[in-house]
Amino acid sequence: MRKIGKSVTADRWEKYLIKICQEFNSTWAWEMEKKGYLEMSVECKLALLKYLCECQFDDNLKFKTIINEEDADTMRLQPIGRDKDGLMYWYQLDQDHNVRMYIEEQDDQDGSSWKCIVRNRNELAETLALLKAQIDPVLLKNSSQQDNSSRESPTLEDEETKKEEETPKQGFFVCFLLYLFYLLLLLYLTI
């Protein structure tokens, strides 16, 4: 709260938070006055936290300047891939190496199709195995041969055969699986 122009002491932070809350939502300010911050609903706490974060963009000039210098696309999380059914896969790894992977339908407008499918390394390995099982065996064999035979230069005939066998969607899916395998390997090596 200090960064948005509100000087706060440790023993009076709740009173200052109530004042900020009155600007945002008087019902929640009333709830905070009656119950205190610790007894408020999770919904209220999250909304307050979101409001305080948004205030950083409006009231903290130093923060606003730094953020405005960044490219917006670099700050957005992008999906790591899509499967043959059109589901998009999102991967997150925090500083403690906690893994999360979410799926979302590609044409989801209201955000209702989000689902967490991976919460730890074992689930990541299982998901990777399931996704590998969905790939056409010929395509998977071609992909692994390409990785193993990097010392041999492919002929023009091999390239044309490969292009005929592999559709763009399948090729992307194989790359997606290889990327997942790489992430899993990195995760195991760092822990």
Image (cartoon, rainbow, N blue to C red):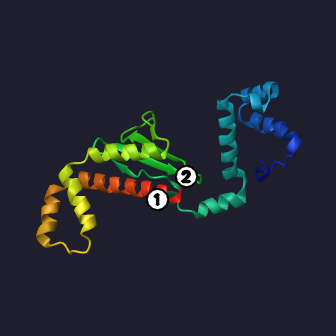
User: Percent position (x, y) of residue 176?
Assistant: 34, 54
Cα gap from disc 2 to disc 1, whole angstroms: 10 Å
Q: Is residue 110 above or below residue 70?
A: above
Looking at the rendered structure, the secondary structure element under dot 2 is loop
Return the residue at label 1: 186
Image-based side of 180 in relation to 159, left or right: right
Contact, mark 2 vs mark 1 (Cβ under 8 Å): no
User: Is 97 positioned to the left or the right of 55 in the image?
Assistant: left
**Left or right placement of residue 180 versus residue 60 in this view:** left
Taking 80 as reference, is 13 above or below it? above
The residue drawn where x is 87% and y is 40% is: 12
Instruction: Say few, some or many: other residues with alpha carbon within 10 Å of mark 2 (under 14 / 14 to 19 / 20 or more).
Output: some
Instruction: Tell me the residue at 80%/29% (across/down).
Output: 36
Task: Name the side, left or right, on which 62 lies relative to 131.
Answer: right
Residue at the spot x=50%, y=53% of the render?
76
Q: Where residue 180 sits: x, y (%)?
A: 39, 53
Q: Quadrant of residue 150?
A: bottom left
Residue 120 pos. (x, y %): 49, 44
On the question of residue 106 being in view, the answer is: yes
Q: Which secondary structure, mark 1? A: helix
Q: Amino acid at mark 2?
A: His
Camera sees residue 168: no
Against 24, residue 175 (above or below) is below
Judge by depth and name the residue closer to the eye, 89 or 73. Answer: 89
Going by the numbered disc 1, the residue's amino acid type is: Leu
